[in-house]
Image (cartoon, helix red, strand yellow):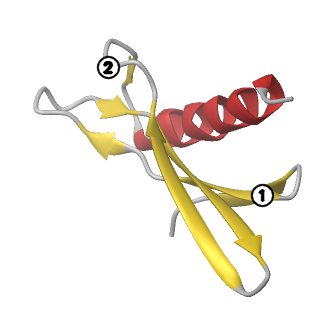
Amino acid sequence: MARRIPYKGYILAAAPYRTAGGRWHAKVIIERHDRGSVHFQPVSDAPEKTYATRQEAEQASISFGQALLDSRK
């Protein structure tokens, strides 16, 4: 199961995926619950950033999502 954490009123779900070269790429799904609706925004990190393991990519995915939310006003 993918790692999911609450952060600043959102849910961040790590959704890393394996590249053609066998390395892992960070991707986060930002989930927002609003008046009975759920909105999903998948966001991938820069394509040149890859990781050797799924666990590293999951942590990077969560950190990436946190940085995105921190940059919003």
Question: Looking at the image, is mark 1 or mark 2 earlier in the sequence?
Answer: 1
Outermost residue, bottom side: 36
> Identity of the amino acid at label 1?
Tyr
In the rendered view, tell whether residue 48 sits above or below residue 23.
Answer: above
x%, y% of residue 56?
52, 33
Which residue lies under the disc numbered 2?
47
In depth, the one of 54 and 5 nearer the eye is 5
Please rate how many residues cluster around mark 2, counting C-alpha atoms within 10 Å: few if below 14, some from 14 to 19, many from 20: few
Who's the residue at 58% across and 31% down the image?
60
Who's the residue at 33% across and 33% down the image?
24
Q: Tell me if label 1 and label 2 are in contact, CB under 8 Å.
A: no
Foreground label between 1 and 2: 1
Task: Tell me the element at label 1.
Answer: strand
Which residue lies under the disc numbered 1?
10
> Identity of the amino acid at label 2?
Pro
x%, y% of residue 58?
53, 43
In the rendered view, tell whether residue 60 sits above or below residue 33.
Answer: above
Q: Quadrant of residue 61?
A: top right
Outermost residue, left side: 20
Task: Tell me the quarter of the image containing the C terminus.
Answer: top right
x%, y% of residue 10?
77, 57
Give the number of the disc on residue 31: none
In the picture, measured across the screen, residue 65 lies left or right of residue 21, that is: right
Q: Quadrant of residue 16?
A: top left
x%, y% of residue 59?
61, 37
Please rate how many residues cluster around mark 1, counting C-alpha atoms within 10 Å: few if below 14, some from 14 to 19, many from 20: some
